[in-house]
Image (cartoon, rainbow, N blue to C red):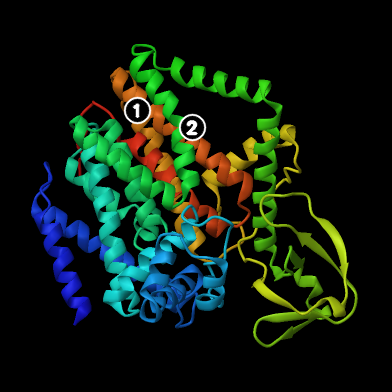
Amino acid sequence: MVFTLVLIVLTWFVWKFKTDGLSRANLLIGWGIKLLFGILFMVIHTKIYGIGEITVDWEEYMDDSVTLNGVAYQSIGDYLKFLFGLNSELDVQQYLAHTNHWSAGDLDLMNDSRNVLRVNSLIVFISRGNVYIHVLFFSFFSFVGLREIFMAFKERIFYDKRLFWYALFLFPTLSFWTSSVLKEPLMITGLAFILNALLGNLSWKSRLWRIVLGFALMLGFKPYVLGCLLLSLPVFLLGKFVFKKRVLLAPVTALAAALLVLWISPDFRKTVTHRLTRMQFDFVNVGRGGVHAYADSCFYYFGTDQYSELEFLPDRKIQVKKPLVAKEVTFGMNYPFEDVLVKPADGPWNVVFRGEPCGSYIELTSIGNDFGQLMKNVPEALVNASFRPAPWDPGGKLKYVNFLETCGLFGLLIFGLWYNRGRRTPEERNSILFLFTFAIILLVLIGWTTPILGALVRYRMPAYLALFLIAVMGSRPFKFKL
């Protein structure tokens, strides 16, 4: 009953959206496609991977959101503290000690995992834990985002506007991940607001509220994507206000400025290299599997090859059977980690994370806190993030879908750039350089740190969207002929 009511209300909002170039039927068909991708996401993560259970982040986020929502029925004041990031560690121990994601990270309102839990916990007041109602809400959020993208680019594409509308909804990675109850729907909506504010034909008032809301959404949900967008913004501004007729000078100038900053600021260079090294190290450990055990002032990491020397106790605790060497993983972004000898008398410890080796794990060249090595890894990172998984890579059958999507996207990109060669206005070229810079920065960042192909496909989605928008942008009319 509640599901049907929510579906009717959200469909009514879709019906009431007025969008130039689209009929109400186009809007409703797009909404229907969005919901079908939500069902597809559920099927894949319950029937294919989960054998009937909701798996991966989905289940953990839903369980934690229901637990967080339950705090409101014990103390509305404490629930509001969690909602606005005012809670203490004692509050966490009292209410959320057994959650999976709430304790991840050191930050609070800047912790995007916790922000997803906050949003979902509010929806639980309506859904009572029914994940399909959450799918409706998150699909609606991303529908709003895709509509914003359509509004920003509908006058810039070289073929029928309706085809562009449906292409946005049929783009596999985009529609698949933005129909979940995770971070992507809200992140892509924030990105869409900012793109429309920068590239759309809007009044200053309309631009302002979109920038503010888009910035808040991207900061709250996947802030590293916002960081990549901000790093590419100078290219757009230089091309728009300085190099109006020679926009190719914009990325050259921005790159020269970035290299100059890195050259004259060794401390900044060291900090960036250090943080990326730590991110890569953490992700490699997750990909290889193992156990992270909480030991008050640090975590102990044990590899899967050490499982036979560990005793897994009830209540998610572990104990070593004999003196054993573990990695002492410190809090924050400190690196490198030392090998320490732990003894049975030192434990037991609470298990924070336990995982088996990921089926789509690939080896990455270690950064090793070396800026020179970081730069040498750029080609590897760009190739991995742009083109993998390939058919011969490890992983499940979905890698073939990802491979076909990659081939289709880059084929369309090559065709679009060729077909509109010499026919672009300076404004179009500037928009393309801006989007291309954003895509390259994001792909390199992901490729540096992500050794799991399944995660890589998910994380690169905003970059693929940018490349798709480049591919369809142009002034030369094109009609499909059968």
Task: Examine the rendered structure and indicate whether residue 467 appears above or below residue 389.
Answer: above
Callout 1 environment at 10 Å: few (<14), some (14 to 19), or many (20+)? Answer: many
Q: Secondary structure at mark 2?
A: helix
Q: Which residue is pictured at 32% across the width and 18% down the height?
A: 422
Q: Which residue is pictured at 39% across the width and 39% down the height?
A: 466
Residue 331 in the image: state x and y as whole percent.
Answer: 69, 57
Task: Examine the rendered structure and indicate whether residue 403 appears above or below residue 465.
Answer: below
Viewer can see residue 154:
no
Task: Examine the rendered structure and indicate whether residue 307 appears above or below residue 434.
Answer: below
Residue 45 in the image: state x and y as whole percent.
Answer: 45, 72
Q: Earlier in the sequence, mark 1 or mark 2?
A: 2
Residue for badge 2? 231
Q: Amino acid at mark 1?
A: Ser
- Eye-nearest disc, 1 or 2: 2
Q: Which residue is pictured at 47% across the width and 22% down the height?
A: 251
Viewer can see residue 15:
yes
Callout 2 environment at 10 Å: few (<14), some (14 to 19), or many (20+)? Answer: some
| Residues marked 1 and 2 touching at CB (< 8 Å) | no
Query: Considering depth in this image, is 204 or 46 the residue closer to the camera?
Result: 204
Q: Secondary structure at mark 1?
A: helix
Q: Amino acid at mark 2?
A: Leu
Query: Considering depth in this image, is 30 or 284 the residue closer to the camera?
Result: 284
Answer with the quarter of the image where residue 207 lies: top left
Q: Is residue 421 left or right of residue 450?
A: left
Residue for badge 1? 431
Residue 323 in the image: state x and y as whole percent.
Answer: 90, 75
Residue 185 in the image: state x and y as whole percent.
Answer: 35, 56
